[in-house]
Image (spheres, grey):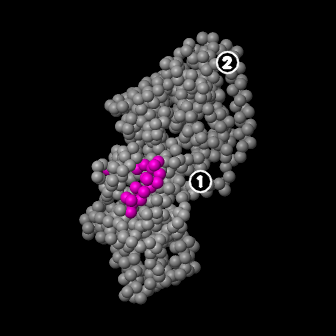
Amino acid sequence: MKATKENKTATLEKKDTYTIDSVDAGTLREWYELMVIGRKLDDKAPNYLKQALGWSYHAPYAGHDGIQLAIGQIFNREKDHLFPYYRDMLTALSAGITPEEILLNGLSKATDIASGGRHMSNHFAKPEWNIHNVSSSTGNHTLHAVGVARAMKRYGHKGVAISSQGESSVSEGYVYEAINGASNEKLPVVFVFQDNGYGISVPKKDQTANRKAADNFRGFKNLRIIHCDGKDVLGSMNAMHEARRHAIEHSEPVIVHASVVRIGSHSNSDRHDLYRDDRELHCVKAHDPLPKYSKVLLQNKIYTQDELDAVDKKANKLIAEAHKKVMKAPDPDPASIYDHVIPTPYKPKKYTDGTHEQEGEKKKMITALNETLKSEFRHNPDTYIWGQDVAYKEKGGIFNVTKGMQKEFGKERVFNAPIAEDFIVGTANGMSRFNEKIRIVIEGAEFADYFWPAMEQYVEMTHDFWRSNGKFVPNVTIRLASGGYIGGGLYHSQTTEGALTTFPGIRVVYPSFADDAAGLLRTSIRSKGPTLFLEPKALYNAKAAETVVPDDFEVPFGKARVRRAGKHLSIITYGNTTHLSIEVAEQIAKEQGKEIEVIDIRSLIPLDTESIIASVKKTNRALVVHEDKVFSGFGAELVSQITDKGFEYLDAPVKRVGSTFTPVGFHKNLEQAILPSAEKIREAAMEILQY
């Protein structure tokens, strides 16, 4: 029951303003019917929880009726992208989602179109209509809307991205990053602030000095702000219509600040009587938009009282029928939990095991990365890269990995981003939503140590595919210059994979040689789904990492590489410590006659456990070496896998060599004391060999 089907949308968009006289009676009635259905569902939701049937999270929208109806009506599913938040039930209905689909979501059924029961109830979505499944992290989707709008502008698409959210969510730093970026790039985004005066129990006065949160953005250039009464249907329609028109015609963002009231508690886990007095509760009920709109319709003879009563009965019947169908719908199958964690990656066709026998001139790792990026940009014209310092004249990032790319591929595909890591990652997620052909590479931060502000968006990216039940996955490669041995100290020499590999839903790779860097980068870009690409910056120009690099080299995920064969001890390693391990192995072979096998895992997720165990089975001894801290480092997982699957083959305890449980210091004496060294690896290896 959506008034703005494609033909209706075209009719409504021709109007300059909506008044009770300019909108046809049929449309006014459809709006009222949607409002009644929505309110009945809103009121019914808590009953399902009381009956232990579902809807364990419900955020009532009553009091937001006008603006939510307008968002859904103005949204054009053929042209726009909509990012509703958890209170947007009427928005979803108005956009075309059916009562049955709302109930399926509320009861977390397997056939729920938003997530198949994987995401919280009251998170409405319909991906095939570009109504996106958004996070519970409030305001998080604002960045995704900006990313989609960037794609719209790049591809000349005449539509808008709509981000709907509560006014308290704009206190989040990433919302400021989103609006700043949208105004700087002049992107067609409509940010709707549904201002009900509260962030759960926190009043607005504790959120911002301005009475209206939108006024915090008054100084932003290329940004229009529209205020409206979000309780009023026609006023909200006018505001949303004008916002969409302006965003498209001027290609710039618009904030619609809608003043509403929250009639109920924040959610079913909140008791608003603990922080709102009787007088306030009486006042907000007196401003209920639904009876006010019905009164307008009666006064203008759009409806008679009998017809209003008939609408009420019709809505009850519609919801009752939907309820019966939904109660018969299947619950999610526990066996399905491993479905859609991460999509099947691109599989190399020529270099199936990620090795090659080519001879020729050796290349530095930095050259291999640069040439592979350029090759992939030529291969797929829908490939983009951005980050800090990546595209200014002859400079290509702090380490010049992207040197020459903007000159060849232009500013539309290679460009600088603000110093805002959340913005860099979040808009990559959003832009990839526009078209599955798009592949995005980002420098998530100038150094891996600076990536932490983007963790909220990183986490979001890891569970997008699972949470949407396979409907959406961001096709993004996140490049980070990682590790030490450069005398960088804090924020320039830390390793982070111990923390970043704890999230399911993302591939994590860490090459040690130029050819693997090129091959893994090519596979990452061509694959669906996100990949974290950690680059040991100390090896960018290191002679030890130089190799011959075939022009078309590809390395599969989850395939380790034997860098040195042996039979007396297995060293399992990756990144900078691969070269230290090889050095130690050669030294011990020369001095002791013991042959050490060095396994370069290359891929942390997925992990080639099979090759690791095969090596341990052959040597009966294992040493795990990595640059990260020993305590809680990724090596702990490697040791666990070895002892779990290869314990019967071991003739000695598994040892680990890594950094001390301290930050990496700046002075070279401190760095040497903290990071792994050939001496430390040799000592551990000899201890195991002599056990």
Left or right for 20, reference 485:
right
Towards the viewer: 57 or 190? 190
Could you tell me which secondary element the residue under label 2 belongs to? helix
Give the percent coordinates (x, y) of residue 360.
39, 72
How far is mark 2 from mark 1, CA to CA?
46 Å
Q: Quadrant of residue 182?
A: top left
Q: Does 459 appear in magenta?
A: no
Foreground label between 2 and 1: 1
- State whether residue 205 is above or below residue 330: above
Taking the image as shown, residue 541 lies to the left or right of residue 528, namely left
Three-letter amino acid code of the residue under disc 2: Leu
Q: Is residue 97 visible?
A: yes
What residue is at 42 percent from the left and 57 percent from the top? 375
Callout 1: SS: loop
Classed neighbour count for the residue bearing mark 2: other residues with Cα under 10 Å, few (<14), some (14–19), many (≥20): some
Q: Residue 690 lies in what quarter of the image?
A: bottom left
Residue tagged 2: 308
Tell me what residue is drawn at x 61 percent, y 32 percent: 96
**Dot 1: within a 10 Å radius of its alpha carbon, few (fewer than 14), some, or many (20 or more) residues?**
many
Residue 3, quarter of the rendered image: top right
**Residue 651 percent across, percent down from the top left:** 52, 83
In the figure, is residue 102 to the left or right of 459? right
Taking the spot 54% from the left edge, 64% from the top edge, the residue there is: 349
Instruction: Answer with mark 2 or mark 1, whichever residue precedes in sequence.
Output: 2
Task: Tally the numbered discs.
Answer: 2
Q: Where does residue 42 sit, x and y in percent of width and height?
A: 61, 31
Kind of residue indicated by mark 1: His
Is the C-beta separation of discs 2 and 1 under 8 Å? no
* Residue occupying the point 49% across, 22% down: 238
Which part of the image, by quadrant, shows the N terminus? top right
Return the residue at label 1: 340
Query: Which portion, as a residue range, is magenta?
Result: 368-389
